[in-house]
Image (cartoon, rainbow, N blue to C red):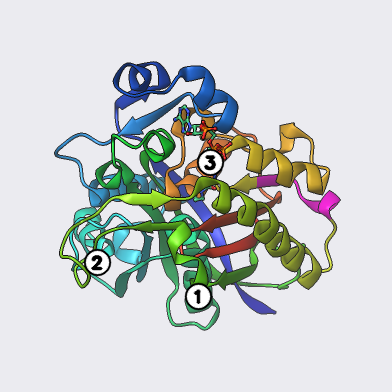
Amino acid sequence: MALRSLALGCGSYLPAQVLTNEELSQRLQTSDIWIRKRTGICQRHIAADDEMTSDLGSAAARQALEQAGIDADEVDLIVCATSTPDETFPATATRIQEQIGCTRGAAFDIQAVCSGFVFALSVADNFLRLGQARTALVIGAETFSRILDWEDRGTCVLFGDGAGAVLLRAAENGGTPQDAGVISTHLYSDGRHHDALYVDGGPSSNGQVGHLRMEGKEVFRHAVVRMADAIDAALEKNDLKASDIDWMVPHQANIRIIESMAKRLDLPKERVVVTVDRHANTSAASIPLALCEAVTDGRIKRGDLILMEAMGGGFTWGSALLRW
Ligand code: UT7
């Protein structure tokens, strides 16, 4: 017997305002065709002026608690992955903790940009498997619209706002890849690639919030190679084959990256959860948003094997295997 982190429920939240490619093409030198063809994105959600990352995260967290049938006061760990915190400090996780009415345990943020959810899942899973917490909310919440340079067509068309959450609870089971729960997580970073994807501001550099800067082609090139390596590591570690995967729930940055990962695994497109067309890239929120969509509409069922993979600024990248 082994302690496993079982996923009891998930939740998501998207701000009401939708910004289409068409609307962007009226403000910028871009077009719906270019954005669709190069990225697969058709629209993105944008947080209202009075909506903060913690509001998005709390809405997703409440839904995850409800789906899991768990009270907020049973939660003893909140890990929030975000690169767009409400404030420099305290952690957005503590704002969420307060908003959902939870007063126990620990709440803190994880910063691994678009890989944030996989990193947060890994941290929470380790807490649960070591017995340091029993019930964890793992949240990815972002308001990237606040750090975009809305005059830079190379970046502002790519991102959106949103949040997703998963409720984990520690339980004993056989601990094999056939048993439910988080099977393994695989995390990597390489700080030499800072300049390819970063925000040109921060409390200790220039005291500004800053804007996202990206060399898209360079990130693309690394993403396909590094995520493929992370997927191989996950399958190898658990003695699984690509054909064992029921669902790929990838980070949603670009449909071309998602399709190349699926092709490599020989996964038919019906087995890949895609939200990039409607959500764009919501950074740490993109995987839990996609996961929640497929769980809620009944595609992902109990017992299904889910592969998640992501790559983001740092660079950071990683993968996770979860049996729902
Ligand atoms: O989540 C974190 C990880 N991030 C990613 O995974 C993003 C990875 N990168 C990408 O998805 C792609 O590289 C982009 C979608 C960002 C860009 O696509 P690309 O095929 O690499 O295009 P490009 O940057 O090479 O640009 C091609 C052309 C350029 O014009 P010239 O120099 O060929 O005349 C750009 O100036 O497209 C131009 N361009 C645009 N045109 C219309 C760039 N952005 C736009 C735009 N609308 N929004």
Q: Position of residue 20 (x, y in %)?
A: 39, 21
Q: Position of residue 105 (x, y in %)?
A: 30, 75
Residue that label 2 marks: 91
Horizontal side of 101 relative to 242 (left or right) equals left
Task: Tell whether label 1 touches label 2 (CB within 8 Å).
Answer: no
Q: Quadrant of residue 198?
A: bottom left
Q: Position of residue 49 (x, y in %)?
A: 16, 36
* Amino acid type of the residue tagged 1 in the rendering: Leu
Q: Regarding mark 1 in the picture, which secondary structure is present there?
A: helix
Horizontal side of 94 relative to 197 (left or right) equals left
Q: How far apart are the two marked residues, 2 and 1, measured between alpha carbons?
A: 21 Å
Label 1: how many residues lie within 10 Å, few (<14), some (14-19) or many (20+)?
many
Q: Quadrant of residue 163?
A: top left
Q: Earlier in the sequence, mark 3 or mark 1?
A: 1
Name the residue rendered at 82%, 53% in the picture: 242
Q: How far apart are the two marked residues, 3 and 2, measured between alpha carbons?
A: 24 Å
Q: Decide: is 28 above or below 71.
A: above
Residue that label 1 marks: 128
Residue closer to the observer: 168 or 24: 24
* Amino acid type of the residue tagged 2 in the rendering: Ala
Q: Residues in magenta?
A: 242-248
* Amino acid type of the residue tagged 3 in the rendering: Ala
Name the residue rendered at 55%, 78% in the picture: 129
Q: Position of residue 166 (x, y in %)?
A: 47, 54
Name the residue rendered at 19%, 65% in the picture: 88
Give the numbered dot on residue 290: 3
Task: Tell whether label 2 touches label 3 (CB within 8 Å).
Answer: no
Label 3: how many residues lie within 10 Å, few (<14), some (14-19) or many (20+)?
many
For the N terminus, give its image quadrant: bottom right
